[in-house]
Image (cartoon, rainbow, N blue to C red):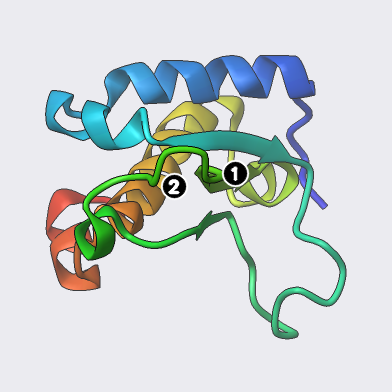
Amino acid sequence: MSRITMSHEEFEGLVRDAMDALPEWTIPTLEEFAVLVEDAPAPGSTRPGTTLLGLYRGIPVTAHGGRVPGSMPSTITLYRLPILAACASREDVAPRVLKVLGHEVGHAMGIPEAELRELGWY
């Protein structure tokens, strides 16, 4: 359990700030999907001993060229409580949110894991 407490609303503000801080070249892709905040992954949705900070659900835009009109958007979900637990202080939360969001946007764009690491989005 996290030593850091932060309301859902305050955390969502950090997510909005992180969205604004992403590189400009990610904006067209970011507009294609929904960014959600949940407290934690659903019970049983992760392997024992693993921590999930964020999750991209969808088909990378490189695989289909954009969202099909009328279809549900792909989603990025950031998990508030695991992110807070991964931080040593409140000051660590905003940079961690940006890193997790950037990582999941990278997955949405089809960027390989090695390149995500080069970008610092690991």
The reply to whether callout 2 and callout 1 are in contact (CB within 8 Å) is: yes
Q: Residue furthest right?
A: 43
Q: Position of residue 41 (x, y in %)?
A: 75, 59
Q: Label 1 belongs to which residue?
A: 78
Secondary structure of the residue carrying tag 2 is: helix
Q: Is residue 35 left or right of residue 46?
A: left
The residue drawn where x is 74% and y is 45% is: 81
Mark 1 packing: few (<14 Cα in 10 Å), some, or many (20+)? many
Q: Is residue 50 left or right of residue 81?
A: left
Q: Position of residue 101 (x, y in %)?
A: 42, 41
Q: Position of residue 2 (x, y in %)?
A: 77, 46
Q: Label 2 belongs to which residue?
A: 100
Q: Label 1 amino acid? A: Leu
Mark 2 packing: few (<14 Cα in 10 Å), some, or many (20+)? many
The residue drawn where x is 40% and y is 52% is: 104
Q: Residue furthest bottom?
A: 48
Point out the image quarter for the C terminus: bottom left
Task: Kindly indicate the quadrant of the structure image that contains residue 27.
Answer: top left
Q: Is residue 51 left or right of residue 15?
A: right
Which badge, 2 or 1, is on the more N-terminal residue? 1
State the separation of the CA atoms marked 2 and 1. Answer: 7 Å
In this rendering, the answer to whether 69 lies above or below 27 is below
The circle on residue 32 is: none
Between 39 and 33, the one lying in front of the other is 33
Task: Kindly indicate the quadrant of the structure image that contains residue 102.
Answer: top left
In this rendering, the answer to whether 121 lies above or below 11 is below
The residue drawn where x is 71% and y is 76% is: 46
Between 83 and 115, the one lying in front of the other is 115
